[in-house]
Amino acid sequence: MSTLETIKDMPMFKHFSENEKKKFAEIDYSLLGFNKDDVIIKQGEDCSSLYLLVKGTVLITKTGHPTPLCKLTPGAIFGEMSFFCKKPRHSNVIANETVLVVQMDDNFFSKIHPDIKDKIKNYLIELLVTRLDIMNETLGKISTYARGYTLP
């Protein structure tokens, strides 16, 4: 399956024209492949790339915790917090099988067309706002639960 076929239905590309999707799919200088158990991101490292998972799955883990926090599937974005904040990585990202990612860093954004850059930026803003909404809703539920809980 071609990169274009793989990305065409991913959420990040919902506002891309067919031509923009085609241009993005032709970007090969930022495509990286990893094998099962390869570490894509290591907790604590200073690196400011973010990634689009194109093929395969990855596990998000924390050093010292044996159970993965979550499993990401194609279309997922990861590494965005360090990309925006320029802080060390908060977790590990490990290939769960053979994976293909697009590494997006300052070099990547300097090479792509401004229209594509703007659409990626807009998607990242939408993604972060959605995550913030989910976190606020979850904290509200925890707060409600905690108010009803009393210590013996």
Image (tube, helix red, strand yellow):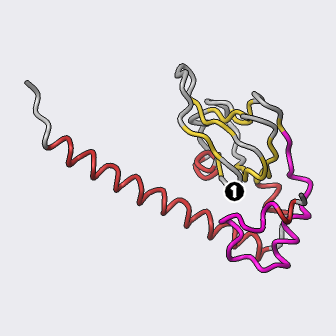
Question: Around disc 1, counting alpha carbons within 10 Å, would you say few (fewer than 14), some (14 to 19), or many (20 or more)?
Answer: many
Q: Which residue: 13% across, 42% down?
A: 148
Q: Nearer the viewer, residue 88 or 99?
A: 99
Q: Is residue 27 above or below residue 98?
A: below
Q: Is residue 134 left or right of residue 27?
A: left
Residue at 57% x, 23% y: name it.
Answer: 63
| Occupied quadrant, residue 45 | top right
Residue 9, x across and y down, in percent: 72, 67
Q: Residue at x 69, y 39 (%)?
A: 58
Numbered disc 1: secondary structure: loop
The image quadrant that residue 1 belongs to is: bottom right
Q: Does 30 lie within the magenta span?
A: yes
Labels in figure, total: 1
Q: Provide residue 42's location: percent of width, then percent of height.
A: 67, 30
The residue singled out by tag 1 in the image is: 75
Looking at this view, name the residue that lies furthest to the front.
1
Q: Residue at x 76, y 44 (%)?
A: 56
Q: Residue 120, relative to residue 143: is it above or below?
A: below
Specify the segment rendered in magenta: 6-33
